[in-house]
Amino acid sequence: MARIVMKFGGTSMAGTERIRRVANIVRKQAALKPDGTRDEVAVVVSAMAGETDRLVNFCREANALYDPAEYDVVVASGEQVTSGLLALTLQSLGCKARSWLGWQLPVHTIEAHAKARIEDIDSEALLESLGRGEIAVIPGFQGLSGDGRITTLGRGGSDTSAVAVAAAIGADRCDIYTDVDGVYTTDPRIVAKARKLKAVTYEEMLELASVGAKVLQTRSVGLAMKEGVRVQVLSSFVDDNATPADALPGTMIVSEEEMNELVEKGEMERQHVTGIAHDKNEAKIILTRVPDRPGAVANIFEPLAKASINVDMIIQNVGRDKGETDVTFTVPQADLARAQALLEDQRGNIGFNRIITDSKIAKISVVGVGMKSHAGVASNMFRALAERGINIQAITTSEIKVSVLIDEDETELAVRVLHTAYGLDAKDEAA
């Protein structure tokens, strides 16, 4: 007997027909096995696709300066609806099922409405329910603050909810069902020869998620790595006769130790680069003629940090003869106008000459744990782009990632060029 957490996203829950398909997938997982055992199954669900946006708009129409606590009450209702509907549908299929809302477990969070973080989950009642053979259906995205108010975890929070539930109940695996059937070497819509990966390490998935791969929410991957939860990404859009999840048809997110075991067994091929990601949602800001003195850079980034504007790439040019320098950095495209206004307000304190912005850029990243032990990954990237006339505007690196900033119009070309350059293209079956 295994203990499994299954998570279904908004597109999987979009309407009663899809909810019935999800219920059939869950029923198969919880069905009696040939050896007479059953898996203990908990299911975490998102709101129906588009429902959270609809609820957010209601809040804005009611009060443009809405109270975040009341906002959470409204937007958390989307997941409450789908959890109840899935429990009802499972019951119609002959399954023992019940829903558990965030406050009923409860899922304890820090008191930060609309962007709460899970502290712990009381799993005693949930484990008793699973022990009775009940399928637990839990709304993702929601929790309970210290003062008893409903909280929400921010966009994509249901992934984090699922991993947190899996950690709390000691699940053998957390299956994240999405509209894709796994993690690919890059976006298959851009590169037809992109390959589905059998396994990816936590570190690699964390980097891929943070630089544009939208398969999993970044926070959920970080929590899985911290708690040692084995995560599998697979598609909920399958036929009734599809292979069950126990046959591992998706991509497993695992520790580096488990990855090494797979390589040693010959089940995985170790490559220097695991995947190529791209992100068109960044904007570049250049501040010219910033005084080249201690504290000048802090004066730029402290106001942005206080406004919760994340800064990614940062480049400071060599100081000019007159003790001045240019500072270049990127922010999320949605925060560009706010960042520009904040910096203009701080012009006197910072002492820059002018602001130059560019929202027509893209970040291209190559990711792979193989970079730790192999030199030349970055130089190969720069050479491949140069040979196709693609100019690099900025560079940032980590132990297992190299990211460059390029013109947005060259995004698809850059992804294809790098995917081929690192030998990631799937081989033709006829070959």
Image (cartoon, rainbow, N blue to C red):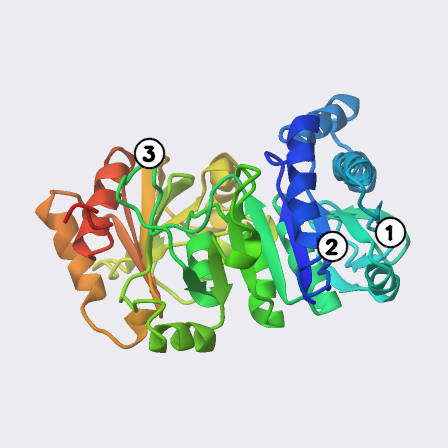
Left or right: residue 313 versus residue 52 is left
Which disc number belongs to residue 42?
A: 2
Residue pointed to by mark 3: 360
Query: Element at badge 1?
Result: loop
Measured Cα–Cα span from mark 3 to mark 1: 44 Å
Three-letter residue code for mark 2: Ala
Query: Element at badge 2?
Result: strand
Measured Cα–Cα span from mark 2 to mark 1: 16 Å
Above or below, comparing residue 62 to residue 39 in the picture? above
Measured Cα–Cα span from mark 3 to mark 2: 43 Å
Query: Element at badge 3?
Result: loop
Q: Nearer the viewer, mark 3 or mark 1?
A: 1
In the rendered image, residue 92, in percent from the top left (x then y), is placed at: 81, 35
Three-letter residue code for mark 1: Trp
**Residue at 89%, 52% in the rendered image:** 104
Q: Residues within 10 Å of mark 1 (few under 14, many from 20)?
A: some
